[in-house]
Amino acid sequence: MNGTKTAVGIIGIIAIGVIWCFIVLNLESLALKELVYPYPNMTLESWTESFIKGAQYAVVASGILALIWSGFSKALNISKWPDTNSLRLRWLILLIIATIATGVLALLYIPAVQTGGGKILAYVFYFFNLFVTYWLATALFSPPIVKYIPLGSKRIRFL
């Protein structure tokens, strides 16, 4: 039974990552195509491809950190709730690592634009993707003993 919960958690985290990569590919890039005006030496298609590549890397990185959180939580072999008090800090540290990684990816993969709010929206999408992927994956699929450690997970689990 315990192995089944672990498998469901891993599959759930991966599913969130795959679904969100699909959203990046099909919805975010379409929204940006209307707002981005790249420099003459770059086509809109190449700008969008660069955005998508970086956004998908950020989603994958966030998913990997969610898997690390899950594995770390299982490895601690915690048996009761009071033993989890210091875990929220560790969860937040992984969130900060994911945020820094996303910022670096955004700087590397979001090309310059001539005008328009597309670049700002691209940054917003990158960080929104990070929070959705990492937060939702950990809030919904953390191991049972730490399922309420991610901020807001108690609320989402009772919906």
Image: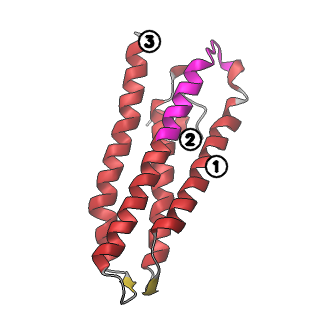
For the residues bearing labels 3 and 2, Cβ distance under 8 angstroms: no
Could you give the CA–CA distance between mark 1 and mark 3, rounded to whole angstroms? 30 Å
Determine which quarter of the picture holds residue 34.
bottom left
Indicate yes or no whether the magenta region holds residue 68.
yes
The front one of 50 and 82 is: 50
**Residue in the image at 63% along x and 19% along y:** 76
Q: Which residue is mark 1?
A: 96
Tell me the mark number nearer the camera, choosing from 3 and 2: 3
In the foreground, 99 or 101: 101
Q: Earlier in the sequence, mark 1 or mark 3?
A: 3
* C-alpha span from label 1 to label 2: 17 Å
Mark 3 or mark 2: whose residue is earlier in sequence:
3
Q: Amino acid at mark 3?
A: Asn
Across the whole image, how many numbered discs are drawn on residues? 3
Which residue is identified by label 3? 2
Residue beneath the point at 60% across and 41% down:
151
What amino acid type is highlighted by mark number 1? Ile
The secondary structure that most of the magenta stretch takes on is helix
Q: Position of residue 96 (x, y in %)?
A: 64, 49
Position in image of residue 94 (x %, y %): 61, 42
Where is residue 64? Give x, y as percent.
Answer: 48, 39
138 left or right, relative to 14:
right
- Viewer-side label of 1, 2: 1
- Quadrant that contains the C terminus: top left
Which residue occupies 36% across, 81% down?
35
- Whether residue 17 is situated above or below residue 2 in the rendered picture: below
Mark 2 neighbour class, 10 Å CA radius: few under 14, some 14 to 19, many 20 or more:
few
From the viewer's perspective, is residue 120 above or below residue 147? Answer: below
In this rendering, position of residue 83 left or right of residue 103: right
Find the distance from the CA under tag 3 to the CA under tag 2: 24 Å
Return the residue at label 2. 152
